[in-house]
Image (cartoon, helix red, strand yellow):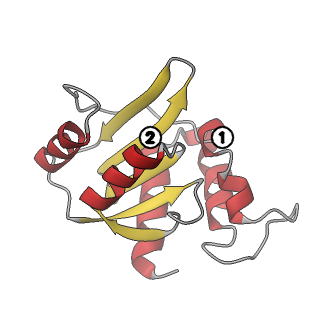
Amino acid sequence: MNELSQIHESRFIAEFVRPERRDRCEQQLTTGRGQKRTNKKGRTRAEILSNLEHWVQFERAEEIPLNSRSVEDILQALRAAGPPERCYVISECEKLDAKFWLLEDIVKHLDEHAVFGTIISCEPGRLAYYSHYESEGLSLTFRSRK
């Protein structure tokens, strides 16, 4: 994992994860970092991230309103907040996790493949997008810090 990836993960944790969960979240995310290393219980990063939506507890932050859940509206809302075109992804989907993606490509992929438990870190510690599943259906939450 390169230095920029580590910056995205550590700043995401510092800014968006509840203080009492930050240490655990940091330990969970540093396990493997895209490799097959395991934590003390022998679990790989992929196994840990398979429960991403259950163990990440977010601290409240400013939310960016959406007109709809369409890819176009999601991209418009994110672009209005000023992210770069390439964003870092933390995901329960091993194919997506710990990689940089073009913003448009990853948002389309999440929509087309109904991937849940995914965080798009647009600007480290400032703008992140979280896609997860709730009992009522797809829930798209935006969080931004200035």
**Which quadrant: the C terminus?**
top left
Res 84 visible: yes
Q: Does residue 46 appear left or right of residue 131 in this picture?
A: right
Q: Residue at x 75, y 65 (%)?
A: 44
Q: Any mark on residue 67, and which?
A: none
Q: Nearer the viewer, residue 90 or 27?
A: 90
- Determine whether the residue tagged by mark 2 lies in a helix, strand or loop: strand
Residue closest to the far front: 112
Q: Nearer the viewer, residue 82 or 134?
A: 134
Q: Residue at x 39, y 75 (%)?
A: 4
Residue closest to the far top: 136
In the rendered image, the vertical position of residue 97 relative to residue 52, given as above or below: below
The disc labelled 1 sits on which kind of residue?
Answer: Trp
Q: Any mark on residue 131, and which?
A: 2
Q: Any mark on residue 55, and which?
A: 1
The disc labelled 2 sits on which kind of residue?
Answer: Ser
Disc 2 to disc 1: CB gap under 8 Å: no
x and y, in percent, of residue 85 in the image: 21, 65
In the rendered image, the vertical position of residue 71 relative to residue 12, given as above or below: above
x and y, in percent, of residue 14 in the image: 46, 52
Between discs 2 and 1, the one toward the N terminus: 1
Q: Does residue 29 appear left or right of residue 43 in this picture?
A: left
Front of the two marks 2 and 1: 2
- Determine whether the residue tagged by mark 1 lies in a helix, strand or loop: helix
Separation of marks 2 and 1 at Cα, in angstroms:
14 Å
Q: Nearer the viewer, residue 106 or 38?
A: 106
Q: Residue 28 appears in which quarter of the rendering?
A: bottom right
Q: Residue at x 61, y 58 (%)?
A: 26
